[in-house]
Amino acid sequence: MMRAEKVGLKLNGRNILRDIDCTVTPGRVTVVMGKNGAGKSTLLQIMAGQVTQGGAAGAVSVDGKAMQDIPSAELAGRRAVLAQSVQLGFPLPVAEVVELGCYARYHQMTARQRKSAVAQYLELLDITRLKNRSFPTLSGGEQKRVLLAKCLLQLDVENPDHKNNRYLLLDEPTAALDLEQQYRFVDLATRLARERGLGVLAVLHDLNLAARFADDLLFLRNGETVAAGPTTKVLTKTIIQETFNVDCLIQPHPCFNCPLITTLPYGKPNIAPALAP
Amino acid sequence: MHSRFIILIILFSLLAVSLAAGIVTGAYDLSVADLWLALTGRAEELEQFLVWQVRLPRLLMAVVVGSALAMTGAATQGLFRNPLAEPTLIGVTSGAMLFAVGMLVFSVHLLAAFPLWVQQLGVSLASFIGALLTTGIVYRLAAGRGQLNVATMLLAGIAIAALTGAITGLLIYQSDEEQLRDITFWSLGSLSGANWTQVAIAAPIVITGGYFLGRDALALNAFLLGEREAAQLGFSVERVKKRVIVWTALIVGVCISLTGLIGFVGLVIPHVLRLWMGTDYRRLLLYSGLLGASFLLMADTLSRSILAPAELPIGILTALVGAPFFLWLLLRERRKISWL
């Protein structure tokens, strides 16, 4: 279990995040939601162990061990972060970007093993055809998949006999993806949790994606927790209202076994200003 | 695997050809047969001396300095994620220049009583100290709360370069004719003073430094995705930054303090190789070293032969030959250079 306890971040006297508890459980998908600037990405960075400057408070532990006590090379094998976007300093081919994933165990592998591992994860994400393309020339969706392949190689998810739990942190994985890709991407992350026991933490914007895939939800507003808990319990009208400041309608989904949320940003739809005569 | 092998063969052949061209070319006409005799120690004294004490150390110095500049250029470009980066930007050269000029101007008073070689050593030592000192200052300015901000470092480097440039200008302004000549020659770089002592000083530092830069090749690859990604992949980002900067300062400091400023090698060689074989630092550092060595060897050979028996400062040659070639490459491969 990966656990953040009472974490916070203060920058220039302003509370970016305050007293947040967050738990990521192996095999489950935890989704963080909130408005822009609510502190979602900051929380994710803290849980990734990447916020080290002053002003950070609280503690993050990985399977009972304090995160700062885990050597960075070992930590790399336990948790991987899919960044919102990556700008390469100089272009690299896709295969080399994915290979970066095994750099923490570089010297324990032979060149051949690394090559076949890269091929394996390209295959897993169905992007073998992109292998020799230059990363910056790919579309946003393709780049995301390449970066995810790198993360999965980093966690060595295809290796069944692993002694440690592994965690995948996704920072707005659906940004810059088209509708179908968004769905497929979150579906894939969920399957990784269910089938390979990864603990997944994702920052999402789409309430319906969260309703369909999340096991646990954490709602943030202005750096503070609005509600946290299993999706079935906390996905309610009041909490959504409180988090996003929008009215909504929650109905049973016509096709899936989950709720369907319709947001009503202007209150009642028939008096929406844009539609008013 | 195959293409990598071929690239290595090409680079090594280029180095061999440049070495061969360098050793047969010069003001004194040496036939290949004489050369062979000299190399095997059976030639006449003059030729023996010429080959062993003049040409060989000079060639080795070109190899050492050329590879040093190109390797550190590649490393700093990766560290700063900036195609325009070169060792100049971390303050090494500006500091070296200031201290060397200061020494050249004041040595009349300070070292006048000593023989010429002490004066030269004084200039080298001063510029080496200057190189490390300015890099240290730039580093301090950019490092806060245990983290080094590379963008701040770039800007601080530029500001410090402007400042030291101004002081250097002042010194130049009040120097006399002869000093002015010395300063000009120093700032254009030259391998004409190369000897075994210089090689013995520079080679170990460059080889050790090259080895340690090479050990950070994986980290430099990870840096291509940004520092945060590199940390996430398991690298101790701050330590990598410190190591690369310290080694770059040491390598470049020792080279330019012995040969003066030689521009363009560190900037251009890595880009030429990137166009040709990509940016993978596991190979780029070694290849840059090889190509940089060949490039400087060729430039030096040209500088000795164009106006023979006079010599052209090598800095002029590296820019004169390198710049048009690089421009040609830029125009031809414009579409491939997405990073510029």
Image (cartoon, coloured by chain):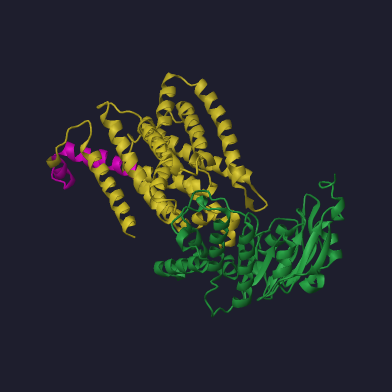
> Which residue does the image show at 85% across and 52% down from the upper left?
A266
Query: Is B53 colored magenta in this rendering?
Result: yes
- In front of the other: B277 or A3: B277
Query: What residue is shown at x 60% (from left), y 39% (from top)?
Result: B156
Residue A106 position within the rendered picture, expressed as x and y whole percent measured from the top left: 47, 66
Q: Residue B70, how many percent across, how many down? A: 41, 44
Residue A269, horizontal then vertical, whole percent: 84, 54
Quadrant in the picture for residue B330 = top left
Q: Is residue A105 left or right of residue A51?
A: left
Give the main secondary structure, helix, strand or loop, of the magenta stretch. helix
* Quarter in which the N terminus of chain A is drawn: bottom right
User: Can residue B181 be seen?
Assistant: yes
- Identify the hue of chain B: yellow
Residue A179 picture location, percent across and down: 64, 59
Q: Residue furthest front?
A: A277
What segment is highlighted magenta in the picture? B34-63
The chain letter of the green chain reads: A
Q: Is residue A274 above or below residue A32?
A: above
**Observer-nearest of B268 and B332:** B332
